[in-house]
Amino acid sequence: MQITFLVNDAEDIQPTQTTAMLISAAVNQGHEVAVTGICDLAGQPDGQPWAHIRWLPEKLAKSTESADLLSLTQQIAQTAPVAAPLTKSDWLFIRTNPARGDRAAAHHLALNLARLCQAQGVQVINQPDGLIRAATKLYLLDLPDFTRPKTLVSQSRADIIAFIQALNAPAVLKPIQGTRGNDVFFIHSAQDSNLNQIIDVILRQGPVMAQRCIPGAAAGDTRVVVFNGQVLEINGKLAAIQRVPQAGDFRSNIHAGGSAQPGQVTADMTKVVAAIGPKLLSDGLFLVGLDFIGAQLVEINVFSTGGLRDADRFTGERFAEAIISRMGELER
């Protein structure tokens, strides 16, 4: 099977990333593997999607050890790209993140070319229409009320302040599109002296998402990896990690200084996954990362969801290998 991984930049894949693990798993299982970046794509005059693709040699170290993943990412960066139709692949695995960098037009082109690939029989994970629907945190508002904290999305300063006042509880303010905990703020109450400044910072990027702060948030959140509508599981072990904030910071994102610990998937979390799993599948969102605080969802990661490196470390399983081996089970 031929699998092409679409990433932000083929020369900048890090060995610590889930993307590197997935590429390695595909190589391990004997697939023909290629990598291309969003700026390597083109729509040809005949309307066909093409790309400058880096086909990986068949003889690569078949391991997920850190040293071999470093060698793999270096090999990808050093491989000369070759122009070829994207439709040559059996699978297009989208591992991009539009919230990183300033290449909005390139990301837009990539998703539209992925649509063309899908229309011509290429299997795409995650599917482009679903990625477009869930490209911002607004996707949470499509879910049942019980699955998420009370939420407002607005560009009105007055409405945001009124929402916080009505909560009579702490709140979290964030941009509707963001990553790695950037510009996420904790608000004690509507009387916070810097509230207006915080709203200004977020409004420069677009609408503000305001959420009731869930009790227990100080202990961090739980990233649960969902594949094919269910919590990813191997031998009874679940792909979940607890992300704990560093001292003096309420954000639990690893890139914001948080640390990873073994995660527990509670019965309430399982209930949420069961409630939203069918929608994820109907939207073609086969691999997602759900961020829980307590029993409620605070974020859904549908692009390059991570967390597998730590999940592997804590469980002794290889979840990336399971994802690649189970791709054939996905609904077409």
Image (cartoon, grey):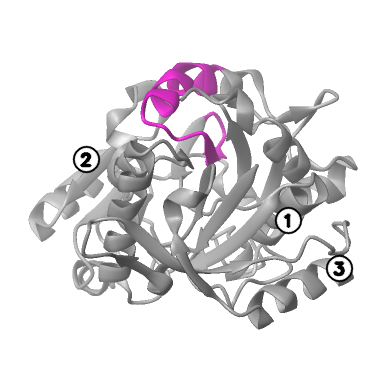
Check disc 3 and give the amino acid type.
Answer: Asp
The spot of residue 146 in percent (x, y) is 39, 22
Range of residues picked out in magenta: 271-295
Residue placed under numbered mark 3 in the picture = 68
Q: CA distance from mark 1 to mark 3?
A: 10 Å
At a point 69% along the width and 65% down the height, the residue shown is 56
Residue placed under numbered mark 2 in the picture = 166
Q: Nearer the viewer, residue 145 or 185?
A: 145
Q: Is residue 138 magenta?
A: no
Of circles 2 and 1, which is in front? 1
Sequence-first tag of 1 and 3: 1
Q: Nearer the viewer, residue 144 or 112?
A: 112
Query: With 61 as the anchor, is 150 left or right in this view?
Result: left
Marks 2/1 in contact by CB < 8 Å: the verdict is no
Q: Is residue 279 magenta?
A: yes
Marks 2/3 in contact by CB < 8 Å: the verdict is no
Residue placed under numbered mark 1 in the picture = 21
Task: State which quadrant residue 51 falls in.
Answer: bottom left
